[in-house]
Image (cartoon, rainbow, N blue to C red):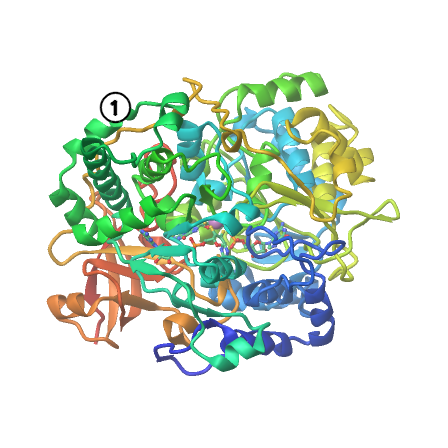
Amino acid sequence: MSQKFRIEPYAGPAGGWGALKSTTRHLLNSEQALSNLKTLANTNQPGGFDCPGCAWGEGKHSGRVSFCENGAKAVNWEATARRVDAAFFAEHSVASLYAQSDHWLEAQGRLAEPMVYDAQTDHYRPISWDDAFALIARHLKALDSPDQAEFYTSGRTSNEAAYLYQLFVRAFGTNNLPDCSNMCHEASGVALRRSVGVGKGTVTMDDFERADAIFVFGQNPGTNHPRMLDTLRDAVRRGAQVVAVNPLKERGLERFTHPQHPLEMLAGGGTTMHTRYVQPKLGGDMALVRGMVKSLLAAERAAQERGEPPVFDHAFLAEHTAGLADYLAEVDATGWDAIETQSGVARATIEGLAEVYRRAERVIATWAMGITQHKHSVATIQEIANLMLLRGNVGKEGAGLCPVRGHSNVQGDRTMGVNERPTDAFLDALGQRFGFAPPRRHGHAVVEAIEAMRTGQSRVFFALGGNFAAATPDTAATEAALRNCDLTVQVSTKLNRSHLVVGKAALILPCLGRTEVDIQAGAPQRITVEDSMSMVHASAGVLEPASAQLKSEPSIVAGLAEAVLGKWPVDWAWLVEDYDRIRELVADTVPGFEDFNARLASPRGFYLGNSARERRWQTDSGRAHFAAVPLPDHLESHEGELALQTLRSHDQYNTTVYGLDDRYRGVFGGRRVVFVSAADLARLGFKAGETVNLVAEWGDGVTRRADGFTLVEYDIPAGCAAAYYPETNPLVALASVGDDSRTPTSKFVPIRLERSGP
Ligand SMILES: Nc1nc2c(c(=O)[nH]1)N[C@H]1C(S)=C(S)[C@@H](COP(=O)(O)OP(=O)(O)OC[C@H]3O[C@@H](n4cnc5c(=O)[nH]c(N)nc54)[C@H](O)[C@@H]3O)O[C@H]1N2
Ligand SMILES: Nc1nc2c(c(=O)[nH]1)N[C@H]1C(S)=C(S)[C@@H](COP(=O)(O)OP(=O)(O)OC[C@H]3O[C@@H](n4cnc5c(=O)[nH]c(N)nc54)[C@H](O)[C@@H]3O)O[C@H]1N2
Ligand SMILES: [Mo]
């Protein structure tokens, strides 16, 4: 499939012929091309299944094709005809599989039957479902405390599976529910709860149709949320301003053509997406936004002096907010020198952005990993909220805060209670409905779970989806932690690194994917998910399951729970005979889900609501809160050092590597590349095309390295570099986490380049 390694800058628009060609190539490479096309036609349509790609919302225009190039890859990847079965594991030892690349592992096909690790032979061999559940139950019951087990969740898990899972984990007695959110949008939740009293985005899809300006911070939608490009393009067409804030020049944000519109493709060029593209230094967004506010404040004072209409929304500020005076004092105390140095953006440019913001009656701010994976992410997001509050851009049509989520149901999993720090109100509701006392001690997030396993404090690791070994930071530390466990269990669809980093005992439990028909007690079931705009809707698979031995995630959780707890505090087996029964329990215990089953009748689902959108502020003060935080002091880069961000290529889904191209960035046939500016190449004495090793020193006495990366010259600010995840995860120190979010700082890794050996 992939050609020779080459670098060839991409000249076309994002989307367009390239997308069509790439999608078709991925489809036709599959042995099931025809059925896959049928599958695609069902994606995100009423009665079909939710795209397992991203968490972007659905437009309400029926008839518009709602899958994208990368959604197509995700669907196709799951619908492969290849199988990883007992014969496969008999042929390959775990050590030999471990030596393969992530791309090779997942390309072997769908996991077909439950397997148990045999340490004597270093091979997996088949095990029955009952024996597998019994083995896990034996290990869990042998622990001194329920807090010695870790229950991870990845964000593809349905609401139904997630709800049962957290209920089981709490009935078992722990809140150790680390999940992929801990590595993803945790900072958004923390910051938004503090600023506006609810940890979710405040906008709906309709708001995007009314916004006058949309600021897109730290996000690469052309690759990671392609359907968002439709939304942005429509906004640009009706005259809205779209401002991209991103250190890298991302093609997908610059130009876009939809492959469904052939005429547009023939016209060439594509719609110019952004009206402005600003390139701050990594981590410089807080300073940039502070500069915008400084400029607005100056304009507000000038307007007051001249008796002109105010810049701030004083009525909103007086009625709805607290902390404004302290915040403005902090803005006054922040000098332009610091703002320009830290953001790397000139004052005049920042003032231009403030002008775009000021002229717009309705503004939306969106963001993703470029904002959330820093040490000062919570402060940065609160700064974005500060900016938005000044002109009442929260809780008004066409305006609001929009963290764009990653995994297709990561937001829903949190709503269902997959949270290591649950609220008392949630635990009270569980306790009351099920008649037990849920544990109140906070549990472990991802980094704490790794530490607990590494020190031997936690002994059992269970993963409902995901690829923990590859997705987490500090690969050597994480692998040691997993190997230190008595038992590791992976509920998965595809073979990945986490199956090969085994505890003393290990299980692989293969499950249905979202595209597949799920039959329980003779009847097909549907599951539900929640998107980034808090819309909950049903999803039902259409494909024949990859193997007759697969179980659904809810039924795996039920099997496990029954083996450990019996029919207490609920009859687990009875519940999963009909997922409506699980939804009844959700309706009883989770606010916003009243009449859950009935409300699923609406094909596009229902809106959960958002208190901040209604200008009800569930904060301590009962008001929206201005955070007055000084700019961070950890960003200055040292002589010879670069700040590295670890990001996604166009041909991957997190740790799932579909192919070796990153078309929009002009990289083909290889992933071990590092993007560096021309200025840094000259300054550090390197040439594009040379091979280097990346070396990270965090001052903890460990030298972390990732070897053999080709230098690619790229349009990125001096002092900043970029390379793909998960190859660069060995460089990220476990201890380097965000303040208050504890998210690994994957977008700011101090490195130096080392000339590769002869
Ligand atoms: N096809 C596909 N879709 C996906 C995924 C996938 O892997 N593949 N992953 C899913 C998941 S779980 C998630 S969380 C999302 C991720 O979606 P994104 O957040 O778009 O993912 P990243 O590739 O990490 O891209 C980070 C972007 O932020 C920019 N950036 C990095 N540091 C900074 C900074 O300091 N400031 C600013 N302003 N920008 C910065 C980078 O240049 C890059 O454009 O996508 C989801 N959708
Ligand atoms: N350095 C660095 N590290 C990062 C990031 C980064 O930007 N840089 N991003 C972080 C982010 S945002 C995230 S969300 C995490 C992602 O972390 P994870 O969610 O743990 O990882 P994925 O790669 O999405 O998981 C892929 C695996 O999920 C399984 N799978 C797929 N579909 C299903 C399903 O329907 N059910 C089940 N049970 N299993 C399924 C398959 O076996 C597949 O191998 O990584 C984080 N790690
Ligand atoms: Mo994510």
- Which residue: 36% across, 32% down? 313
Measured as percent of width and height from the top left, residue 208 is found at: 51, 50
The residue furthest right is 522
Find out if the beta carbon at label 1 lies less than 8 Å from the nearest ligand 1 atom: no
Q: Is residue 95 visible?
A: no
* Disc 1: CA contacts within 10 A as few (<14), some (14-19) or many (>=20): few
**In the visual, does 58 lie left or right of 442?**
right
Res 448 → quadrant: top left
Whether residue 608 sits left or right of residue 46 in the image: it is left
The answer to which of 654 and 334 lies nearer the viewer is 334
Q: Position of residue 277 (x, y in %)?
A: 31, 60
Q: Which residue is mark 1?
A: 325
Q: Amino acid at mark 1?
A: Ala
Q: Nearer the viewer, residue 441 or 65?
A: 65
**Which of 301 and 68 lies nearest the eye of the viewer?**
301
122 above or below 178? below
Q: Is residue 309 visible?
A: yes
